[in-house]
Amino acid sequence: MVTNRIVIADDHPLFRDALEQTIASALADLEIHQAGSLENVISVLEGPDDFDLVLLDLKMPGVLGFSGLIFLRAQFPNTPVVVVSASEEAPVVRRIMELGASGFIPKSASMDDMQSAVKTILAGEIWVPENIDLTHDKPDEDADLARRMTTLTPQQMRVLMMLRDGLLNKQIAFKLDVSEATVKAHVSAILQKLNVDSRTQAVIAAAKIDHAVEI
């Protein structure tokens, strides 16, 4: 009987394999799925099984930064997401936690720390390295925008990501199998929630969230 199902999402196969071996050596009755892109992650999570944890890299196909985390938290709110990244700066970790992650594991962490982190998070707790200060030392101008981004529905996040990729309404409608009128309604809702006046400004806002700090 499988006790825990985990998705490891990273575009480097060697790192995925190493992380899988690290976790598997510490947990029994474990089922691990690997994904090399955001679309792969979505495909796995939309399958018949429920998953207990996603370990997500910030830099992989379909994930330009924080938007991948925002999307997964909106689309699969009951599945904890933990960011595993080589970017260990406190502003990055703070933004990750603000956007609903259940933890942050640096890629430089020891095997013991990675195992401890996964066990802690699977137990329903939050885990970040002890040396990371999550308190703000100055006002964060992008915090309000980040909060607005999290109010988008999963479909609205899909539309925004496609707008960011330069797709027209007709192309988005085809990919989502909806009418152009539905896409226009989603775009209008996105503009209202992000408090911007045009789709161009919405794309700029999305890029600002992704690159508010260097990742």
Image (cartoon, rainbow, N blue to C red):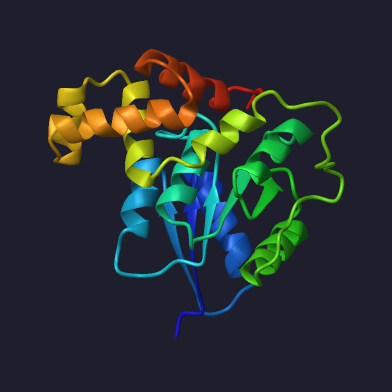
Is residue 29 positioned above or below 180 on the image? below
**Residue 160 pos. (x, y %):** 37, 30
Q: Residue at x 58, y 29 (%)?
A: 145
**Residue 71 pos. (x, y %):** 44, 43
Q: Is residue 12 visible?
A: no
Residue 24 or 106: which is nearer the viewer?
A: 106
76 with respect to 176 (left or right): right
65 with respect to 89 (left or right): left
59 with respect to 34 (left or right): right
Q: Residue furthest bottom?
A: 1
Q: Residue at x 66, y 31 (%)?
A: 143
**Residue 113 pos. (x, y %):** 76, 58
Is residue 176 positioned above or below 141 on the image? below
- The answer to which image quadrant residue 37 occupies is top left
73 with respect to 140 (left or right): left
Count of labels in the image: 0
Task: Name the quadrant of the C terminus.
Answer: top right
Residue 213 or 142: which is nearer the viewer?
A: 142
Is residue 152 positioned above or below 194 on the image? below
Q: Residue at x 60, y 49 (%)?
A: 100
Task: Name the quadrant of the N terminus.
Answer: bottom left
Q: Is residue 156 visible?
A: yes
**Residue 165 pos. (x, y %):** 33, 22
Q: Residue at x 70, y 65 (%)?
A: 125
